Amino acid sequence: MERTIYGMRPVKRARLTLQEDDDRGDVIDEQQAAATVIEHYEHLGGAREVPQGAGFGYANGGANARVASPPWHDDDKDGHYMFELGENITSRYKIISKMGEGTFGRVLECWDRDAREYVAIKVIRSIQKYRDAAMIEIDVLHTLAKNDRTGSWHCLMLKDWFDFRNHVCIVCERLGPSLYDFLRKNNYRPFPVDLVRDFGRQLLESVAYMHELTLIHTDLKPENILLVSSEYVKVPDYKKSQTGKHVKRVPKSSEIKLIDFGSATFESHYHCSVVSTRHYRAPEIIFGLGWTYPCDLWSVGCILVELCSGDALFQTHENLEHLAMMERVLGPIPQHMVKRADRHSEKYVRHGCELNWPEGAISKDSIRAVRRLPRLRNLIMQHVDHSGGLLIDLLQGLFKFEASERLTAKEALKHPFFREPSRRL
């Protein structure tokens, strides 16, 4: 029998790669970029081009000291900025390490000689559609910062931006690891429910703040939620571990920041047809029914499940299987939603009123993968020692198939789950 992707299904979700653009929420929609970038660019006053010559005054030694600009490196074949550790981006920022890489570019840890602090610089690929998207992200970050000078709404703080050798560079505060990276390095052991509560409250506060500004994030996922601090403690792990280790890591602080606003969309601006990274994508997006603020709340529900279970709720890369998983975990999708599916989604429907499942499955392994999933209540109770009932009730409000019936961020924050006293040591 020929092996399929489902025959090799990993127990844990692999981090999405640049080759999986169809499943990523940060795919550039060129029509969207073309429709909005000029307005954003003019609003920001245009990019500041940084001179290309030798050092010009920013240095550890004071105003008279000189810091050489880095040697010229050709970009790689994908338009990524090439560098060596210890080089400079302009004479102000010294490159310390590479913190990460994604579709848009690379994030570098740098020393800011002027402010005398470490910062993170997102260096955008030298390709026009990514440069255009970066200008939109900068405008969003300006909007967020203008209305929240103290950073109390848990959104990434923009420090500066400039254009360097055809790369838009976005300078932000340096933060700790993402919640996904923390899970991965912790062998996918879930967070304690009290930490999940703290994370969820802050995330919903960020989303409520964005929605108040008529902004929709559209790409909420654990990779885009960063711990402010990298510090952690090791505590006994009394549950069975696949690795045989009896300790697990727990963050010292539950403070988080929401990042990556490159896909954020103002409600009044053009909406591309597909948003959100696959695992966190709401059903109305898959059916082509249009989307607005509630798609962020569906993603929040998926995130909360992943944080308290250690696994992505919907581990799939195919639309029909994804919808079948939703029905398996949450119950039947309303017929009126299925009937309104757009022409691109008609292939997932039979008789015009129900999912074409399991007849439309691409393999028997796919059918088995769906059947293995537990109902939402059972899944949560497997992992949550206390507050399980309240968390399930909250999730049921976030996982309403009909977007108009889903809890808003402000409503979710009032849920009794967030009034439970913390039992953290």
Image: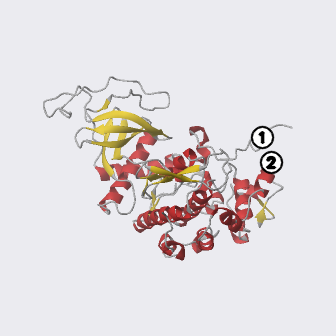
- Residue at image point 56% right, 39% down: 18
Camera-nearest residue between 44 and 327: 327
* Cα separation between marks 2 and 1: 8 Å
The relative height of residue 37 versus residue 353 in the rendered view (above or below) is above
Disc number placed over residue 37 in the picture, else none: none
Seen in the image, is 356 located left or right of residue 330? right
Camera-nearest residue between 337 and 399: 399
Which quadrant of the rendered structure holds the N terminus? top right
Image mark count:
2
Badge 2 vs badge 1, beta-carbon distance below 8 Å: yes
The relative height of residue 8 versus residue 421 in the rendered view (above or below) is above
The amino acid sitting under disc 2 is: Asp
Seen in the image, is 165 located left or right of residue 196? left
Disc number placed over residue 365 in the picture, else none: 2
The amino acid sitting under disc 1 is: Thr
Seen in the image, is 268 located left or right of residue 326? left
Residue 101 position within the rendered picture, expressed as x and y whole percent measured from the top left: 48, 38
Residue 323 position within the rendered picture, expressed as x and y whole percent measured from the top left: 71, 59
Residue sitting at the far left: 64
Q: Is residue 406 visible?
A: yes
Q: Which residue is mark 1?
A: 4
Snapshot quadrant of residue 208: bottom left
Q: Earlier in the sequence, mark 2 or mark 1?
A: 1
Residue sitting at the far right: 1
Label 1 SS: loop
Q: Is residue 25 visible?
A: no
Other residues around mark 1 within 10 Å, as few (<14) / some (14–19) / many (≥20): few
Residue 193 position within the rendered picture, expressed as x and y whole percent measured from the top left: 56, 64
Q: How is the image coloured?
A: secondary structure
Other residues around mark 2 within 10 Å, as few (<14) / some (14–19) / many (≥20): some
Label 2 SS: helix
